[in-house]
Image (tube, rainbow, N blue to C red):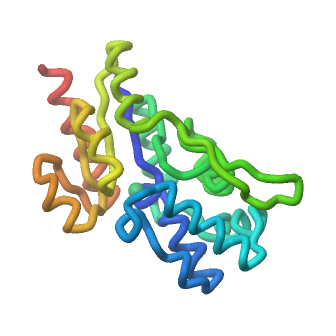
Amino acid sequence: VEVACLDLEGVLVPEVWIGVTETMGIEALRATTRDIPDYGQLMRQRLEILDQNGIGLSQIQAVIAEMGPLEGAREFLDWLRENYQVVILSDTFYQFATPLMRQLGWPFLLCHHLQTDGAGHITGWDLCVPGHKREAVRAFHGLNFKVIAVGDSFNDTGMLGEADTGIFFSAPENVTRDFPGFQTTQDYGALKTAFQEASRKLRES
Ligand SMILES: [Mg+2]
């Protein structure tokens, strides 16, 4: 049995910060790691904007719950969990992911954690170890498992490279251009086929 490591945002659910930006109409929140590569600086800016607009964790969670998973994600994930041991490796936070995990049937998720005060304001965050996606794949290899990994962006390439098979799902062209070594898929049907093909090759080798 192989371990399937999946990114969350862009693979099973929409981009959370973009959804929050659009629903709440706060353009300043639209910045991503593409605009501000320093993650700590980006997060501090986001928390400042939330504070200025008086937005607490529960309001964000309500927006995220309405977003729901991507169309067909639940069915794909259910199929995957019947055939693989599935782990979701994400750079989101547990408090953001919870409403979506409920809709996905509570899969195993490793991500970061937000700090909040008694009034429900987000005051900071605790990160997993740096490169936790790649480190998780390494750990599974240490346990003698083969790993098939799926992601859609630059923060997944360490994980995809460390896995026995790395697959892009619905990745932007600037990402796939920089990493031409990984197979690309655009929909869950193609992703399912890619998994079956990867398993067959891993079992033959
Ligand atoms: Mg992603």
Q: Position of residue 39 (x, y in %)?
A: 46, 56
Asked which quadrant contains residue 196, the reply is: top left
- The residue at 24%/41% (across/down) is 166
Q: Foreground: 49 or 96?
A: 49
Residue furthest to the right in view is 118
Q: Position of residue 35 (x, y in %)?
A: 38, 71
Q: Foreground: 15 or 76?
A: 15
- The residue at 31%/29% (across/down) is 147
Left or right position of 12 against 152: right
Please state the quadrant of the image where ligand 1 appears. Answer: bottom left
Asked which quadrant contains residue 132, the reply is: top left
Check the picture and name the quadrant holding the N terminus: top left
Vertically, is 72 above or below 162? below
Q: Position of residue 86 (x, y in %)?
A: 45, 35
Asked which quadrant contains residue 200, the reply is: top left
Left or right position of 48 against 176: right
Q: Position of residue 76 (x, y in %)?
A: 43, 50
- The residue at 32%/57% (across/down) is 153
Vertically, is 43 above or below 203? below
Check the picture and name the quadrant holding the C terminus: top left
